[in-house]
Amino acid sequence: MSNGRAQKRRGPGFRRKIRTLPLRFEDSELEGLTIEVKSLDTGEFLSLAALVEMDFETLGPEEVAAVEKMFTLFSSKMVEWNMTDEDDTPLPPTKESLYSLELFDVIEMITGYMNAVAGVSGPLERPSTSGEQSLEESIPMDVS
């Protein structure tokens, strides 16, 4: 902790490792798509969060610049993906490849990215409908 005075470093400094996150899309138009992305720092997250909340129905010059910024940031964090074109040729994970996709798909990718960085988990597994009791529930326990 700092008390306002310069402190001498004792030992080697700490450099955090940049995390990578797997994005998997299920139950959507992007089902089957996987993207590996680098995590965001806090400033990037806040900037991207503000951009994602934009009203896309009224795109003026400022909004177009914001979308450009959003695409630039997201594409700079993409490590790899399994996206292909109509001829099954792999697309590189670049901003230019994002430009070749429908806007709604890219927004869904970026929203999934934001949820992954924020730690929001995907949909929970559906509960079993078999009606069978779990093993734990059938083990008698003395609770006295």
Image: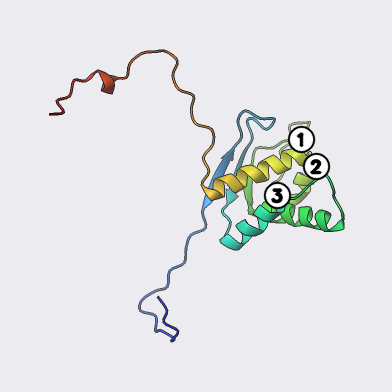
Lateral position of residue 76 relative to residue 103, left or right: left
| Residue underneath mark 2 | 100
Disc 1 to disc 2, C-alpha distance: 9 Å
Specify the color scheme.
rainbow
Rendered location of residue 63, percent (x, y): 81, 54
Quadrant that contains the N terminus = bottom left
- Check contact, mark 1 vs mark 2: CB within 8 A: yes
Comparing labels 3 and 2, the label whose residue is closer to the camera: 3
Q: Amino acid at mark 2?
A: Ser
Rendered location of residue 127, percent (x, y): 45, 22
Q: Amino acid at mark 3?
A: Glu
Disc 3 to disc 2, C-alpha distance: 22 Å
Q: Amino acid at mark 1?
A: Asp
First in sequence: mark 3 vs mark 1 = 3
The answer to which quarter of the image holds residue 115 is: top right
The answer to which quarter of the image holds residue 116 is: top right
Residue closer to the observer: 58 or 144? 144
The answer to which quarter of the image holds residue 61 is: bottom right
| Residue underneath mark 1 | 85
Q: Residue at the far front: name it.
A: 144
Secondary structure of the residue carrying tag 1 is loop
Mark seen at residue 53 = 3
Lateral position of residue 126 relative to residue 109, left or right: left
